[in-house]
Image: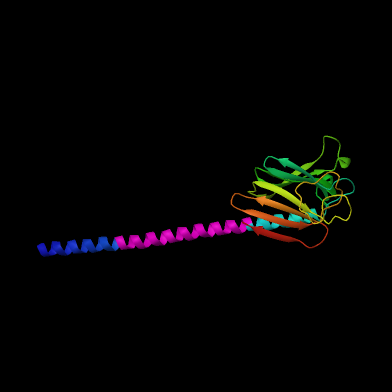
Amino acid sequence: MSSKMTRRSFMLLEVLIASFLVFLVVSASLSWFIFSLKASREQSQQLLISQKRCQAVSHIRSILRRISHTRGAPFTVEAIGKSQALIFSYNNGVDPNPQLSNEVLAMLHVDTNGLVLTIRSATERAAIGQETEESYVLWPGVETLSFSFLFVNTSPEGPTPYTWITEWQPEWTQIPTVVRLTIKEKKRTSTVTCLTKTKLNAIQISG
């Protein structure tokens, strides 16, 4: 009798040990699966963010190469909180909305959504008070934006040649050769350098 009870006790102990080992294996496998799934999701999110950054840079370069400037200063730089906004006009080409085709007024600025491009119909194509306006989020997560400019000064007008400046004076009518954007996110600072008059462009990202 005691022999049978002892055998049953050993069998019960073996079952408990086996169940515990199976539990450990399943727990470890499940933890690894959850970790891998989370890492894969984060990697996909980072890849998507990188793609959006590249698309934003490409869009900004394209816009600045199409600046339409006939008289006065080509840019207006305004301070909005801790950030800056760049106001200019450019050729938007053909748009589904006729009022946003060809030359439009544009502003690169930061709001709660990130880096935004806002375009507005030129006043000569729309009745006063009926201008069409659209905004596009180019770069989510941007907190501040600032600009600096470089151009080759061939006349006494304007700053010293090859000098980076952060403010564009109304009397400077020449389009700068280079526009540099400093884009700050929560944990990253990017510097985008765009040439306005040539097909060559450069981008340097740091941080």
Tell me what residue is drawn at x 82 percent, y 39 percent: 131
Is residue 77 toward the left or the right of residue 3 in the image? right
The reply, left or right, for residue 1 in relation to residue 18 is: left
Residue 11 location in percent, x, y?
21, 64
x then y, percent, for residue 142:
65, 48
In the orientation shown, which residue stands out farthest toward the left?
1
Give the residues in magenta: 20-49
Q: Quadrant of the C terminus?
A: bottom right
Residue drawn 62% across the image and 50% down it: 185
Q: How is the image coloured?
A: rainbow
Choose between 95 and 64: the one closer to the eye: 64
Q: Position of residue 120 (x, y in %)?
A: 80, 43
Question: Is residue 79 left or right of 20 when viewed as pictured?
Answer: right
Whether residue 97 appears in this view of the structure is no
Secondary structure mostly taken by the magenta-highlighted segment of the chain? helix
Q: Is residue 110 magenta?
A: no
Give the image quarter of residue 30: bottom left
Task: Report the residue at 74% width, 55% height from top.
Answer: 59
